[in-house]
Image (spheres, coloured by chain):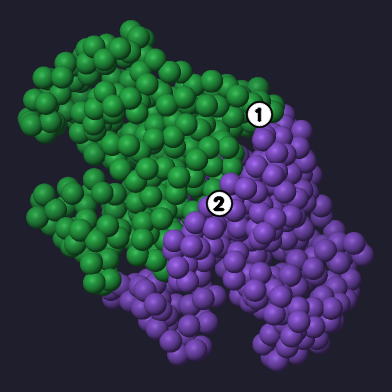
Chain colours: A purple, B green
Amino acid sequence: MRVSYEELHETLRRTLLKVGFEQGRADLCARLFADTDRDGVYTHGLTRFPRFIEMIGRGVVDVSARPLRVEAHGALERWDGRSGAGNLNAHESMERAVGLSRQFGVGCVALRNTNHWMRGGSYGWQAAEAGVLAVCWTNTMPNLPPWGSSRPLLGNNPLVIAVPRPAGHVVLDMAMSQFSYGSLAAYRERGELLPVDGGFDSEGRLTRDPRAVEESARPLPAGYWKGSGLALLLDMAAALLSAGLATHQIPADPLAETRVSQVFLAFDLTSLGGPENAARIADDIITNLHTAGGEGVCYPGERTLRVRLENLQDGIPVDASVWEQVQKLS
Amino acid sequence: MRVSYEELHETLRRTLLKVGFEQGRADLCARLFADTDRDGVYTHGLTRFPRFIEMIGRGVVDVSARPLRVEAHGALERWDGRSGAGNLNAHESMERAVGLSRQFGVGCVALRNTNHWMRGGSYGWQAAEAGVLAVCWTNTMPNLPPWGSSRPLLGNNPLVIAVPRPAGHVVLDMAMSQFSYGSLAAYRERGELLPVDGGFDSEGRLTRDPRAVEESARPLPAGYWKGSGLALLLDMAAALLSAGLATHQIPADPLAETRVSQVFLAFDLTSLGGPENAARIADDIITNLHTAGGEGVCYPGERTLRVRLENLQDGIPVDASVWEQVQKLS
């Protein structure tokens, strides 16, 4: 079934007011959830909302906490998320990084003690809308075995890179596992095999069977040793810059995952050469990719715009049982 | 055969003086090449030296050119490499980024019109030695087909992340292809199959045969669509920030590859919380990885330290024919 963007947003907003968010914050938090489904990232929006509300009930997420700046050194600031709502904390951090970049050319906010930011791409789109080139990443609870081990010691630590482009922002949002658990579940529910190996089965063989990977809890790092190394370095950088927790210190339970560390970097393009020049370079690259690459090639963010338009026109697809559950909460 | 570090460095230095480098620059350039072999990265050191000298002869690399700052906006600067030696330009850019980070907490140098930086990890080790957390990347000539295309439209755009750690720096140096052409050649010469799929054969099938990938010129992006997306975004960010060329504008010929774009980011850890705190966090993460991960797991940079010690003690392995060739140049 499909519901309108307005109905989705309003239902979430009402629920957030009910659990204690202030007006403006309830509105923004609901918007960040609704935008995620509007953009077709169904694994990270509405579907996660009931768990988000449950984590508020358990005291993992504090509805009234706002991030606090604890140290500042010019263009680099360290903030404490104080266990507030992860998407609101991340949004405020990116906003601050953008502000720092206006002043210093580049700005960095390192955020500790925050909660799951839901869709990482949200903060890439946010920065791109502000005309800023951005990089951000988060660590997570342990859910990914490093290359050479069968134990989930690393996080899948999503990385976002966003390039503003008036004709369509380019936003990469990638976790360090080849498939997220959300994707594995989606393939399993459709009864499909993964298009490429997605992890190991319980006997340690590479497999395309999503259920086997879910059972072994051994998803594959993207690029084998490469994604494994990158996940480790993203965790180290997030923990060191924020002086926050590293993956191995975060509870390995989706309902208890908290106090994660994040980094938000913004680069102001108006300061150097101007936005017209940046737009021209970005357009050149995308045009070449399309013309020389053929129909099979698209850039990260390209499909998003198509899905967004479709979902705004026809309504946003929702899982009927999740939607019912959320309506009861509201 | 093996040669001592001193002999290797001196031979390269002499050659560089002969082709016109100033004393200090010849010394540093030779050191950057020699350190690469000392650290076991045999694909990017001595082996590439004859080509480097040839590119000087062809006028692709200008021995007397030094990078010039063309724009500055606080912590973000844009430099022109003026077709100088790629490793010297990169070294100076990272040094400048480190300097900016001391002043602003974070520093960024975007460099255009530079040449191949040889081993990217060099600038990660350089930053880590300075106690700074660093990220840098370069674009390259087109050598990697994007996911969904058989034409090499992307660069393999190496990305480096370095975390300083007194007990052993953690330095990730990864190209966006699953295997570099240097690695493919090494597997082929040893008569070995790749440990995992490394690209497509000329009929479009995934293969572990290194020769088949060399012949088709279709190496696999690390993590399939993930490495493909990351390579694109790294290229866009490098070109936009430096106002330099993007991959599709760079000649697809190793002897003519020039005017590449690079980004150097440094984060000063002394400004926030202090280096002791950073070292403690880094040690915690590595200790957990080693104790929980078992013997199969090591961090990026760990093997480097072992190889470095061995090569300093026993001499550095060199290919006899390349060594003869370089000696004739000197």
Residue A227 located left or right of residue A27: left
Q: Residue furthest right?
A: A23
Residue at x 41%, y 42% (from the top left corner): B250
Instruction: State the separation of the CA atoms marked 2 and 1.
Output: 27 Å
Is A253 located above or below residue B1 in the figure? below
Is A185 located above or below residue B134 in the figure? below
Q: Nearer the viewer, residue A10 or B65?
A: B65
Secondary structure beneath dot 1 equals: loop
The three-letter code of the residue at mark 2 reads Asp
Is A176 located above or below residue B7 in the figure? below
Q: Residue A297: give x, y in percent of width and height.
A: 47, 67
Q: Kindly identify which numbered label has been placed on residue A30.
A: none
Residue at x 49%, y 21% (from the top left corner): B67
Task: Name the residue tied to disc 1.
Answer: B75
Residue at x 72%, y 48% (from the top left corner): A131
Secondary structure beneath dot 2 equals: helix
Residue A241 located left or right of residue A204: right
Instruction: Give residue A300's quadrant in the image.
Output: bottom right
- Label 1: chain? B
Residue A146 located left or right of residue B37: right
Q: Is residue B77 visible?
A: yes
Badge 1 density bin: few <14, some 14–19, many ≥20, Cα 10 Å: many
Badge 2 density bin: few <14, some 14–19, many ≥20, Cα 10 Å: some
Is A303 located above or below residue B260 in the figure? below
Q: Is residue B195 visible?
A: no
Task: Name the residue tied to disc 2.
Answer: A284
Residue A125 located left or right of residue A222: right
The three-letter code of the residue at mark 1 reads Ala
Q: Residue A267: give x, y in percent of width and height.
A: 66, 41
- Label 2: chain? A
Q: Quadrant of the N terminus of chain A?
A: bottom right
